[in-house]
Image (cartoon, rainbow, N blue to C red):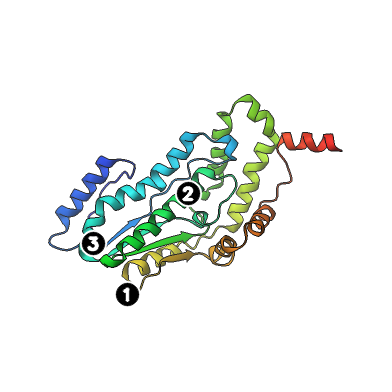
Amino acid sequence: MHPVSLDVTSDESVRQAKEFVERNLGGLKLWGVVNNAGVFSCYGPDDWTTIEDYKRAAEVNTFGVIRVTHAFKKLVKRAEGRIVAVTSVNGRLSSPGAGPYVVSKFGTEAYMDAIRQELHEMGVKVSILEPGIFRTALIDEQAMLNRVESVWSKLDDETKEDYGEEYKNYFGKMWNHVYVSLSSTKTHYVVDNYLHALTAKYPRHRYYCGWDAILLFIPLSLMPTWWSDLVVRIIGHQEVKPAIVEKRLKKKN
């Protein structure tokens, strides 16, 4: 094993990693590339985000995958090997409050679908892993609350007034509850799928990792939009509304 430091957001770092791999192949061929770098970027409604939040998420989750794949693709083609990327069920079904993350994951899914078809005749197998919610650093409760506080602190006064402190506090706690209650500690589901994608004679195009992915999120992604929207609203039912919504409701009453 030859570990190498790699920053997927840096062309130079990726170039150096490729050269390192080439020097250490020792006459062998590179069988597989696994893209598993990921970042959440921010947390909150789109009104709370900036274009920079979207760029940060895409730079790792989407362009990082493209950058690494571009660098190593020729080596994999020589071996008629495997290219694997971890996306998310959020690459199939959007979730409110996670815009930058979701957009980047949808982009990665599209890229992997494109190269899967392009590389088929060259003997390269391309697989996507779509994990559900697993207990990782992304799902750490305090980290999630910190993300909410971080984006909130950067908002202008008008946006803060539209949502209100009560909604901000509730939003973080509510989504913590939803994500933590659905999250699994059995990360070996993902690791097992990595192994199958890299070593099986007939790897799958897509791997659904976790029972929440298999029984809830992937089926929802195949449902009519109105139905999946309804279920997502039920799962994430908000007892506290944004301040601007509460004001309108009071006026109507």
- Name the front one of labels 1 and 3: 3
- How far across and down, in percent of the image, does residue 84 sit? 35, 60
Observer-nearest of 184 and 7: 7
Q: Which mark is residue 77?
A: 3
Q: Residue furthest top?
A: 157
Q: Which mark is residue 201?
A: 1
Q: Which residue is mark 2?
A: 137
Q: Which quarter of the figure has residue 97?
A: top right
Observer-nearest of 133 and 98: 98
Q: Which quarter of the figure has residue 122?
A: bottom left
> Which residue type does callout 2 highlight?
Ala
Label 1 to label 3: alpha-carbon separation: 16 Å
Q: Residue furthest right?
A: 253
Q: Is residue 186 left or right of residue 178?
A: left
Q: Residue at x 29, y 65 (%)?
A: 124
Does the rendering let one see residue 30? no
Q: Which of the image's four quarters has the N terminus?
A: bottom left
- Name the front one of labels 1 and 2: 1
Q: Residue at x 43, y 54 (%)?
A: 110
Q: Earlier in the sequence, mark 2 or mark 3?
A: 3
Q: Residue at x 69, y 55 (%)?
A: 234
Observer-nearest of 106 and 237: 106
Q: Is residue 251 above or below residue 211?
A: above
Q: Earlier in the sequence, mark 1 or mark 3?
A: 3
Q: Residue furthest bottom?
A: 201
Q: Which of the image's four quarters has the C terminus?
A: top right
> Which residue type does callout 3 highlight?
Lys
Q: Is residue 125 above or below residue 179?
A: below
